[in-house]
Image (tube, grey):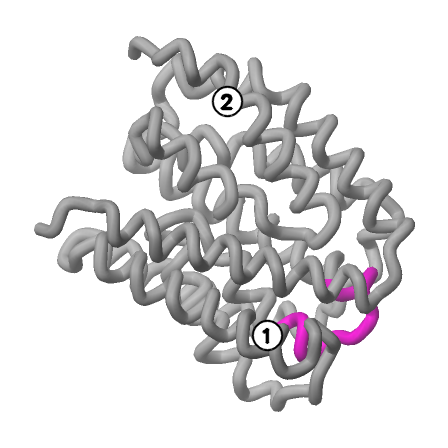
Amino acid sequence: MEFSPWVYLIAPLVVFAGYVAFGISGFGATILIVPVLAQLLPIKFIVPMLVLLDLVASILMRANKATQARDLGEIRWMLPFMLTGMLLGAYLLKIASERWLMLALGVFVAGYALITLLRSGGGAGPTIARGWGAPIALLGGIGSALFGTGGPVYAIYVSRRLHDAGVMRATMSTLISISVVVRIVAFALTGLLLKIELGLAALALLGFMAGGLLLGLRLHSRMKPQDVRHVVHVLLVVSGSSLALRALMMTAP
């Protein structure tokens, strides 16, 4: 595969910025990186490449003591719905228009986060019922399978259930880790990971990923819980809007 010269300049910067966001909030890397790099590279190349970087990032996050206070009860509750959503997403990928699915997901995520920011300044807001975890995890699983972008959807639920910034980030990073493992298996079975270019590209970007992640972890430790929560909701607006914009720019089927 031949790369545009712009790839060598833009990809490292975008990957670095994406994993700064991941280090701060426990999610946000893929959904921030994909819309930018998709202007230069095929999505079928970008998403499998990023899942390799996500795997290393998740291992580093789990090794960090500040990210070990995850809420296992919420994870166990969300997990079956998340996995069901991934299976459903894989099926939808075959029969539905990617454009309209991406647009719907983007509008939903950005709209919810924007309303939250306007009403509460990105504060914690009232705690929502655990029952909301089922549809939200299902939607997040669908987004993960289709676009590798389930993190923002999971954050909608997690940020309104967990009000400790450290626990919130740790829980998010664990959900992302599970998603990464499932996607790696799926991509391996479909042959998407069996390309030498993917491994070389991931290896070349590994240092930028690690640097961004470490900077994000440092920034997280110096931020107040309400500031972290605000960053999460701003990321939701940006990432959701980027998905919707990309969908609108796609050629109609």
Label 1, residues with CA under 10 Å away: few <14, some 14-19, many ≥20: many
Residue 148 vs residue 112, the one in the foreground: 112
Of residues 145 and 152, the one nearer the viewer is 152
**Label 2, residues with CA under 10 Å away: few <14, some 14-19, many ≥20:** few
**Residues in magenta, as a range:** 158-168
Circle 1: residue type:
Tyr
Residue located beneath label 2 in the image: 10
Q: Give the camera-side residue of 124 and 96.
A: 124
Q: Which residue is most to the front?
A: 118
Tell us which disc is closer to us: 1 or 2. 2
Residue closer to the observer: 143 or 103: 103
Q: Is residue 27 left or right of residue 218?
A: left
Residue 73 sits in which quadrant?
A: bottom right
Residue farthest to the left, as pictured = 253
Query: In the figure, is residue 154 to the left or right of 56?
Result: left
Query: x, y percentage for residue 19?
Result: 65, 38
Q: Between marks 1 and 2, how big is the CA–CA gap?
A: 32 Å
Image mark for residue 157: 1
